[in-house]
């Protein structure tokens, strides 16, 4: 679907939810997409992108950043502590802060560099064992601990369980953000970003609806 159609759908969802025009940021999820598709979207003016893998982003983005100034990259895939070093250099935003050991590592890096990417805490709203994210019951304490470390928290992120109505998960994430005074809500993907906007999403992460289906991840 053309980028302009996605933008129009976001604008309609903002209006329907009684929210200000432009209050939702579109993150174009470019993981494992052919270069030509990503370049076409850059040519159309999109500058905010999401990537899942540190290594893949490190290979692709330096050249694209040089050609299309103003790019801002969000890490939306799980971050191994031993890749945090590289991640803080590559990404303007890390959305997958999900455990104390990673918070400590990011805090040490921030101290050493004098700057940090903007951070979202990932919450495992479905409490799925195989999924990353802090459990909802632990979120308040974890957020408080991150603040004690002076980490720049912008908001919360979630990926609802496959095959479930995402709406209760979006509502739950919004409640956790609200009671912790966090403004950012990264939720909603190709299949459900309008529902997420109705529940207060400030950032939607849309991949296949913009770029087409992804081929399987190369080995
Ligand atoms: C891949 C991915 C997306 C985009 O998914 P689509 O269904 O292609 O829009 C969004 N968020 C995360 C965390 C992802 O891994």
Image (tube, rainbow, N blue to C red):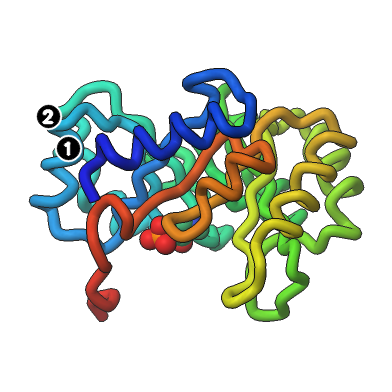
Q: Secondary structure at mark 1?
A: helix
> Which residue occupies 90% across, 59% down?
137
Asked whether the residues under the numbered discs 1 and 2 touch, taking CB atoms below 8 Å apart as contact, a structural biologist would say yes
Please indicate whether residue 149 sits to the left or right of residue 111 in the image. Answer: right
Q: Position of residue 171 (x, y in %)?
A: 76, 49
Q: Is residue 151 left or right of residue 190?
A: right
Q: Quadrant of the C terminus?
A: bottom left
Mark 2, residue position: 67
SS class, disc 2: helix
The residue lying at 23 percent from left, 61 percent from top is 212
* Disc 1 within 8 angstroms of ligand 1 (CB): no
Residue at horizontal 29%, vertical 75%? Answer: 217
Q: Residues within 10 Å of mark 2 (few under 14, many from 20)?
A: few
Q: Nearer the viewer, residue 74 or 207?
A: 207
Residue 160: numbered disc: none
Spot occupied by residue 197 in the image (x, y as percentages of width and height) = 58, 40
Pointer 1 residue: 64
206 to the left or right of 99: left
Q: Position of residue 152 (x, y in %)?
A: 67, 29
Q: On screen, 206 above or below 7?
A: below
- Mark 2 sits near ligand 1, with its Cβ under 8 Å away: no
In front of the other: 83 or 56: 56
Q: Is residue 71 above or below residue 197?
A: above
Above or below for 170 versus 165: above
Label 1 CA crowd tier, 10 Å (few <14, some 14–19, many 20+): some
Measured Cα–Cα span from mark 1 to mark 2? 5 Å
């Amino acid at each position: 679907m053309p980028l302009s159609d996605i933008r129009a759908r976001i604008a309609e969802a903002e209006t329907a939810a009684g929210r200000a025009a432009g209050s939702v940021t579109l993150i174009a999820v470019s993981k494992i997409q052919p270069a030509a598709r990503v370049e076409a979207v850059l040519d159309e003016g999109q500058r905010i992108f999401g990537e899942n893998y540190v290594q893949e982003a490190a290979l692709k983005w330096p050249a694209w950043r040089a050609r299309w100034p103003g790019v801002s990259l969000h890490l939306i895939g799980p971050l191994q502590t031993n890749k945090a070093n590289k991640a803080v250099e590559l990404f303007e935003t890390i959305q997958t802060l999900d455990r104390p050991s990673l918070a400590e590592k990011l805090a040490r890096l921030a101290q050493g560099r004098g700057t940090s990417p903007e951070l979202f805490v990932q919450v495992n709203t479905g409490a799925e064992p195989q999924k990353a994210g802090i459990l909802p019951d632990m979120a308040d304490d974890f957020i408080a601990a991150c603040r004690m470390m002076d980490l720049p928290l912008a908001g919360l992120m979630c990926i609802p369980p496959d095959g479930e109505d995402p709406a209760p998960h979006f509502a739950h994430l919004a409640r956790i953000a609200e009671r912790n005074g966090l403004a950012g809500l990264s939720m909603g993907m190709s299949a459900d970003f309008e529902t997420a906007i109705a529940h207060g999403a400030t950032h939607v992460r849309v991949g296949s609806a913009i770029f087409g289906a992804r081929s399987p991840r190369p080995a």
